[in-house]
Image: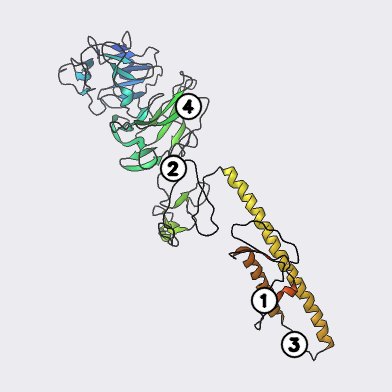
Amino acid sequence: MFPTTCLCFLFFQFFASAASASTSSNDTLTTTGSINDGQIIVSTGNNYALGFFSPGNSSYRYVGIWFHKIPEITVVWVANRDNPLNDSSGVVSLALDGNLIISSSSDQRRPLWSTNVSVSDNTTVLKLLNSGNLVLYSGGGTSRTLWQSFDHPTNILLPKMKLRLDRRIGLNRVLTSWRSKDDPGRGIYSFGFDQRGSPQPFLDNGSTPVWRGGPWDGQRFSRSTQLAQSHIYSYAFVDTTDELYTVYDIYNSSIISPIVLDDSGALQWMTWVERNRRWIAFYSAPTDWCDYYGHCGVYASCRTDNTAECNCLPGFQPKSPTDWYLTEWSDGCVRKRPLGCDITGGGSGCIAWFGDLMDIRYFSDGGDDLYLRVDAAELAAQARKDKGFFHKKWEVIFTVCLVVGFLFFAVSACSLRKKRKDKNKRPLLDWRKRFEIIMGIDRDVLYLHEDSRLRIVHRDLKASNVLLNEEMIPKISDFGMARIFDGDQIQTNTKSGT
C-alpha cells in the first residue's frame, strides 16, 4: 500500500506546446527582449528550459521551468500557477520598472504576474542558471541578485535549493502541491519547517500534520532513517539566528534527482534512469501507517512488526479500551496511576551550576545532593564498582547469617540429644521461635551496616555475644572488640582485646 520504491510518473508533464517551441540564442533575457508563447530560453549546460506550457489536459497556459534533456518534459517550477492565461497570447518580459512580468500581448500594461521587487533602475537582466534557478539581476550584470525562483518554490525541491525559514523577515519557504495533474495552482499539501518544539520538516494537509521528518541528529532527520549520507548525495541542516534551512546536493551533476510533493500528498525523492528512460522513487514518505503523524495517539508507540500496530508505553493503558481493541487508536493512552509527586519532588528548589565547580565540601549529615553530568563510560565503571561493593557487603551479611544459623542448629541438635536423655528438663524452643531469633540477629547486623548513624565494625560476632530478653528478642552485645567510626571517618586502628 505504501511502496518505498516504485516506477511512476508523479511529475506533471506536457508535450504539444513544448515540442513546437523555438529556442532562444542564450539563457538571458534583457529589457530589450521578450519570450513569446512558443519560445523558450535554455540554460548554458542545457539542463533546464523556460517557456509556456499547458499541463495535462488543460488548455490554460503557464510559464514554467522544466528539465530540457528529458523527453517526457517535467515541470519543476511555475511562475503564474494561480493566474493562468486563457490563450497563447502570453509574453514574458522585463517591465519598465525592471521587474519580470507575464502579460498578454494585447495588454502588457496589466501583468498577470510579476516578481514585484523594488528596483532602482530598469537595467535588470534575467538569467536561467544551469541549476534550474531563474535569477533577476540588477545593473545589467550578475553582481546583485534582486529575485530568484529558488526563494519561491512550487512543488519540487532541486539540488542546492534551500527549504528555508527566514527568521529575519518571518518568511517560511515551503513546497506546495499542485491541485491536480491538470492544475498547478496551490494545493492542500505543503512541506516545510515547523518551529513547534525542535525544528523539523513537516508534511501538512492544510493545518493538519500528516508526517514529520524528526529533529536533525547530526547526520539526518531522525524519522528519515533510510536517508543516511551516501557517496551519491549529501544533505545538510543549518540552524542560525537568521535562518533555518536544509539543502541537498548530488555529487554527479549528470544525475537528475529532484524531491517532489505530488497532488496526493506523497513526498518522493525521484531519479531519472536514462537507460530505462523512466523515473524511479528511491525514497517516499509516508511509507506505512506508522509514518502518519499521531497514528497511535498520545503515550503510545507504533510498530509494523507486531500484529497490533499500537502499544501503550509502560505504565499507561488505553484511554478508550473498547475503541483500542477495535484498532481505533487515535485516543491514545493514559497513565494507569497518577504521579504522586509535586513539582519539586519534596525538595525546596533546584540550582543549575555551569562552568568549573569550585569550593565543594562533603557533609556527613545534611547538605544537598549534587548531580554531575559525566561520560557514559564513567557511569558504567561506577556501576561495576558499586555492584562489586554491594556484592561483597551482602556476602558478609549472608556469611554472618549462615554462621549464626549453623551455631543455632548445632546447639539445637545437642539440646535434642539431651532432651532424649532427660525428658524431665523444661521444653526447648520450637523451630518457629528459633527462626525468629535468627531473623532478629540478621536485622541487627543489617542495621549496623545500612541504617546506623555511626559506623560500627563488630569484629567478634558469635553465639555467646547474642543476648535474649524475656520475649526472646535477640540483641547483639559487645565485649571490647567493636569499634565506632565517626560519620566522615573511613578507617581506625585498635588492638584486638582492648
User: Disc 2 on helix, strand or loop?
Assistant: helix
Q: Distance between the residues labelled 1 and 3?
A: 20 Å
User: Disc 4 on helix, strand or loop?
Assistant: strand
User: Disc 3 on helix, strand or loop?
Assistant: loop
Furthest residue in direction right, as rendered: 421
Q: Where, quadrant-wise, is the C terminus in this rendering?
A: bottom right
Q: Tell me which corner region of the image, top left, top right, bottom left or bottom right, holds residue 1.
A: top left
Q: Name the residue under label 1.
A: 474
Residue 337, given in percent of the width and then of the height, sits at 44, 62
* Residue type for callout 2: Asp
Q: Name the residue under label 4.
A: 234
Of labels 2 and 3, earlier in sequence is 2
* Residue type for callout 3: Pro
Of labels 4 and 1, earlier in sequence is 4
Residue 311, given in percent of the width and then of the height, sits at 48, 53
Residue 61, given in percent of the width and then of the height, sits at 25, 23
Q: Tell me which corner region of the image, top left, top right, bottom left or bottom right, holds residue 72.
A: top left
Q: Mark 2 points at which residue?
A: 291
Residue at the spot x=64%, y=50% of the render? 384
- Which circle, 3 or 4, is nearer the viewer? 3
Q: Distance between the residues labelled 2 and 1?
A: 65 Å
Q: Do the residues labelled 2 and 3 touch (CB within 8 Å)?
A: no
* Residue type for callout 1: Pro
Of labels 3 and 4, earlier in sequence is 4
Mark 3 Cα-neighbour bin, 10 Å: few <14, some 14–19, many ≥20: few
In the image, is 104 to the left or to the right of 459? left
Q: Name the residue under label 3.
A: 427
